[in-house]
Image (cartoon, grey):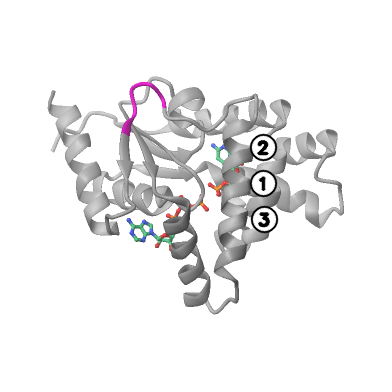
Amino acid sequence: MDKSPLTIAIDGPAASGKGTLSRRLAAHYGLRHLDTGLTYRAVAKAMIDRDASLDDEDAALDAARTLDLSAMDRTILSAHGVGEAASRVAVMPAVRRELVERQRTFANKGHGAVLDGRDIGTVVLPDADVKLYVTASAEIRAERRYHEILRNGGEAREADILADIKRRDERDMGRSDSPLRPAEDAHLLDTSEMGIEAAFNAARLLINGKRSA
Ligand SMILES: Nc1ncnc2c1ncn2[C@@H]1O[C@H](COP(=O)(O)OP(=O)(O)OP(=O)(O)O)[C@@H](O)[C@H]1O
Ligand SMILES: Nc1ccn([C@@H]2O[C@H](COP(=O)(O)O)[C@@H](O)[C@H]2O)c(=O)n1
């Protein structure tokens, strides 16, 4: 296998499967992985814990500056409501600047990395070796998330999840700073009719093709 450093940027809307794919790719290529959504979630959670308003930019910036990437707990941060709150602090340019800096430092520290989020290919790592934009219809994404919540012992209504996903898509794609969109040189991967294994194999083929080109 080619041992040169490899940076992979993976973007896509909520519950599109970018985290699942990123973890598989990181394990396969022996790369470190950062789920950048967790950084926005951690800022939002810190504000909720401090009873700060989610519109308070000073409090959000303070939470971003004091964030410890190594202490982010996926189990706590993955709650559906925290994702919604994260998309509200993610519209703040000062918070984005702070977190993007931290994310770049992570990416540049070692021998390659996989980062997933909303602006990785467009803003955080515009020179990434490979860029993927993972998507699926809102209905399929809501169905997958619904089953995930049930599997984990939670309760939810699929219709509420679909409404949340559509609202979050709108906020993430419509914000003026770093809106969610595919980078011009990103490969599109629509997994609406593709299982996890098939998506992983498709991504692996694209990456290997790019490396040997
Ligand atoms: N190709 C696929 N086929 C079927 N289910 C999938 C596929 N990819 C991911 N999933 C499932 O869909 C759900 C959402 O996936 P995942 O958490 O990876 O999405 P995400 O884009 O990282 O979400 P978020 O934006 O909330 O971070 C999970 O339950 C995962 O197991
Ligand atoms: N690079 C990123 C990553 C995430 N966001 C915002 O955080 C929210 C939560 O992200 P998840 O991937 O964990 O669902 C998301 O809705 C975005 O608003 C971002 O802006 N940039």
Residue 117 among those drawn in magenta: no
Tell me the tag on residue 211.
none
Residue hosting label 1:
86
Quadrant for residue 128, please give it. Answer: top left
Nearest the viewer among 135 and 29 is 135
14 relative to 30 in the view: left or right: right
The percent position of residue 87, horizontal first and vertical second, equals 65, 43
97 relative to 122 in the view: left or right: right
Secondary element at tag 3: helix
The percent position of residue 40, horizontal first and vertical second, equals 63, 43
Q: Are marks 2 and 1 in contact (CB under 8 Å)?
A: yes
The percent position of residue 24, horizontal first and vertical second, equals 31, 52
Quadrant for residue 207, please give it. Answer: top left
Name, please, the residue furthest toward the bottom. Answer: 153
Q: Is mark 1 within 8 Å of ligand 2?
A: yes
Instruction: Calculate the distance from the C-alpha at mark 3 to the C-alpha at mark 2.
Output: 12 Å
Tell me the tag on residue 82.
3
Q: Are marks 1 and 3 in contact (CB under 8 Å)?
A: yes
Q: Residues within 10 Å of mark 1 (few under 14, many from 20)?
A: many
Quadrant for residue 82, please give it. Answer: bottom right
Q: Residues within 10 Å of mark 3 (few under 14, many from 20)?
A: many
